[in-house]
Image (cartoon, rainbow, N blue to C red):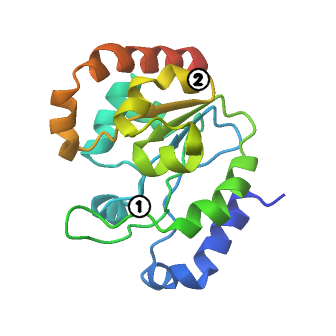
Amino acid sequence: MKTIDEIKQELMTDPRNQDYTQRDIPPIFQADPQAKILIIGQAPGKKVEESLIPFHDKSGEKLMAWMGIDANTFYSKDIAIVPMDFYYPGKAKTGDKPPRKFIAQEYHASLLACMPQIQLTILIGNYAMKYYLGKEMEKNGTETVRNYQNYLPTYFPIVHPSPLNFRWQKKNPWFEEEVVPVLKDRVAHILR
């Protein structure tokens, strides 16, 4: 089995990531063999690419609030952050480009194998849900999040905490009223 550092080196020497490596941008993820909670999101944004710290933006602040934890806990060995792409994929006409598929396909399994103590995987957004839930997913992301209990205790699907999702959150108040308290409880129980 490869170590987390070996996987990181492999990513940096992968020719498909050469553009990032040449600009001194390492793969942006957080992993530790002691991690108990795994967060799988989309891909780092431009701001995160600049800081090299996962979720070091408004989305991260919102996610921490939803999880009921502070930054010290979020950036501790207890929490792993393994997005669908470890690099900022660039701008598209609306929002960012989708994560490159090969990252999850070729690197996730070996990284997850390094973290045997994961008790809960939080799937953020459609890319993560489609990849990890596949045919088990409801007809769309909203319905999958609404029926989150169907995926417990392994997975907890949630909407992306991006400020760009405020319309969705306004239209779906049940998420913060009913789902977020359950997420907070699960996180607190695992970290206790």
| Location of mark 1 (residue) | 52
Q: Is residue 124 visible?
A: yes
At mark 2, the secondary structure is loop
Q: Residue at x 66, y 66 (%)?
A: 106
Q: Amino acid at mark 2?
A: Leu
Q: Residue visible at 23% across and 61% down? A: 95
What's the distance in space between the residues labelled 1 and 2, CA to CA? Answer: 31 Å
Check disc 1: other Cα within 10 Å, few if <14, some if 14-19, many if 20+: some
Front residue of this view, candidates 125 and 9: 125
Looking at the rendered structure, the secondary structure element under dot 1 is loop
Left or right of 114 in this view: 24: left
Q: Return the residue nearer the eye: 25 or 99.
A: 99
12 up-or-down from 45: above or below: below
Give left or right: position of 108 versus 51. Answer: right
> What residue is rendered at 57% in x and 37% in y?
136
Q: Position of residue 107 (x, y in %)?
A: 65, 62
- Residue identified by numbered label 2: 152
Choose between 53 and 183: the one closer to the eye: 183
Residue 11, percent from left and from top: 61, 72
Residue occupying image coordinates x 32% and y 27%: 65
Residue 28 percent coordinates (x, y): 48, 60
Residue 27 appears left or right of 116: left
Q: Position of residue 48 (x, y in %)?
A: 34, 58
Q: Quadrant of residue 4?
A: bottom right
Q: Earlier in the sequence, mark 1 or mark 2?
A: 1
Q: Is residue 105 above or below residue 42?
A: below
Location of the C terminus (image quadrant): top right
Instruction: Find the residue positioned furthest to the front.
Output: 139
